[in-house]
Amino acid sequence: MSYAVVLRELHRIHIQLTDLRERLERGPRQIKAHETNVARAEAEVAKLKNDQKLAKVAADGKQLQLKTSEGKLIDLRVKLNQSKSNREYQALKDQIAADEMSGSVLQDEILEAMEKIDEFKKHIAAAELVLTKAKDEMARVQQGIRDQQGMLDGDYKRLEAELKTVEGGLPEDLRDTYNRMVRSKGADGMAQVEGEHCGGCYQTITANTMSSLLMDKIILCQVCGRLLYLPEDRTPGQKRGKK
Ligand SMILES: [Zn+2]
């Protein structure tokens, strides 16, 4: 078997393994992103509920204030009816007018606060909808990733076994270089020749290098150091027995 045939096979397996590794690592990252979304939506609901609570407390305070002031007004009107002098009468009348004025301001403020509390209800409902959607989406993604992860794991184990088999058949003189390249660069330790270029760094390959490749020699790219091999349609028919 020519070096190119073995290297092409090994490179394919390494690329697939790298891709599978990335996909296996992507799953937990995706789940994490969804968890962040859910947490953000939860925080938004909690914040709105708290703001609504504060608005209710403020409105209750004003209502209590209004009730007290109304009680005071009743007393003042009683006193007004019983007033014995014009001066006292006028003073009470002014006091009542002032209290009625501040009471009406309070009523407006209470109305406004009620409207605000109603607004909060709408905002909370909307935020809760966002939260529900975020949770559903997370559950859907988690399920999808769980299903996919099992499949990817299976593919990964199968490819690892395939890699071992092909590596077992590596010609002795290629093994050391291959091991060194894969150890340091993984799938990037190899590159297919594309046209007149190294498929890894896209630098032009010299005519000398090309003819060495055609003679099925072990060749590293002079620029990037990748272990080079020819594509299938340019691989010489030369056979090399397994050693
Ligand atoms: Zn290169």
Image (cartoon, grey):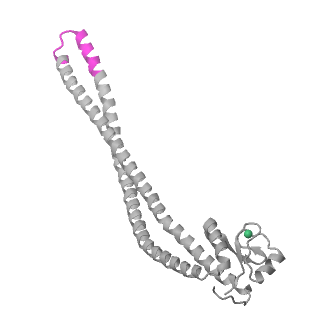
Any magenta on residue 83? yes
Say whether residue 178 is visible. yes
Q: Is residue 192 left or right of residue 70?
A: right
- In the orientation shown, which residue stands out farthest toward the right? 207
Q: Main secondary structure of the magenta part?
A: helix
Where in the figure is residue 41, as x and y percent of width and height? 40, 53
Q: Identify the residue at image location x=53%, y=72%.
A: 20
Where in the figure is residue 190, as x and y percent of width and height? 67, 73
Say which quarter of the image contains residue 12: bottom right
Say which quarter of the image contains residue 9: bottom right
Q: Quadrant of the C terminus?
A: bottom right
Of residue 153 and residue 132, the one placed in the foreground of this image is: 153
Q: Identify the residue at image location x=76%, y=80%.
A: 213
Say which quarter of the image contains residue 204: bottom right
Any magenta on residue 73? no
Q: Quadrant of the N terminus?
A: bottom right
Where are the magenta residues, as a range?
80-97
